[in-house]
Image (tube, rainbow, N blue to C red):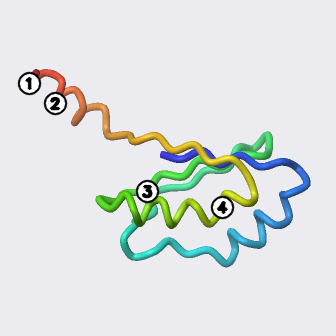
């Protein structure tokens, strides 16, 4: 899960770049949500290749701040935790 935050003066460039952006083959876009208050997007992707993820998300760092957090479905996580 990534949270991308941009400043108001970058809004038009973010919109332009997003219209042209396509996720690479190694990274599958699961979902994308826009903060209706403005200035943030939440992006959920699936990949087994950290290099591909870094390359994919680095394309945005000139426009804003990108926070990446590895996540998994709660049910799956709870099964793994229970085995410990």
**Label 3 – label 1 distance at C-alpha:** 26 Å
The residue labelled by disc 3 is: 45
Label 4 vs label 2, nearer the camera: 4
Say which element carries label 4: loop
Count the labels in the image: 4
Task: Give the class, few, some or many, for how many residues have Cα within 10 Å of label 4's Cα (few <14, many ≥20).
Answer: some
Label 4 vs label 3, nearer the camera: 4
The residue labelled by disc 2 is: 80
Q: Are marks 2 and 1 in contact (CB under 8 Å)?
A: yes
**Label 1 – label 4 distance at C-alpha:** 38 Å
Q: On residue 83, which mark appears? A: 1
**Label 3 – label 2 distance at C-alpha:** 21 Å
* Mark 4 / mark 3, whichever is N-terminal: 3
Residue 66 screen position, x and y as percent: 62, 48
Give the residue drawn at x 48%, y 45%.
1
Asked whether 55 or 35 is in front, the reply is 55
Say which element carries label 1: loop
The residue labelled by disc 4 is: 60
Q: Are marks 1 and 4 in contact (CB under 8 Å)?
A: no
**Label 4 – label 2 distance at C-alpha:** 33 Å
């Amino acid at each position: 899960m990534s949270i991308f935050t941009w400043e108001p003066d970058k809004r038009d460039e973010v919109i332009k770049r997003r219209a042209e952006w396509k996720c690479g083959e190694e990274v599958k876009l699961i979902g994308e949500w826009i903060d209706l208050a403005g200035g943030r997007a939440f992006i959920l992707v699936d990949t087994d290749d950290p290099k591909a993820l870094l390359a994919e998300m680095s394309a945005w760092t000139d426009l804003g701040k990108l926070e990446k957090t590895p996540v998994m479905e709660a049910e799956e996580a709870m099964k793994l935790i229970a085995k410990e």
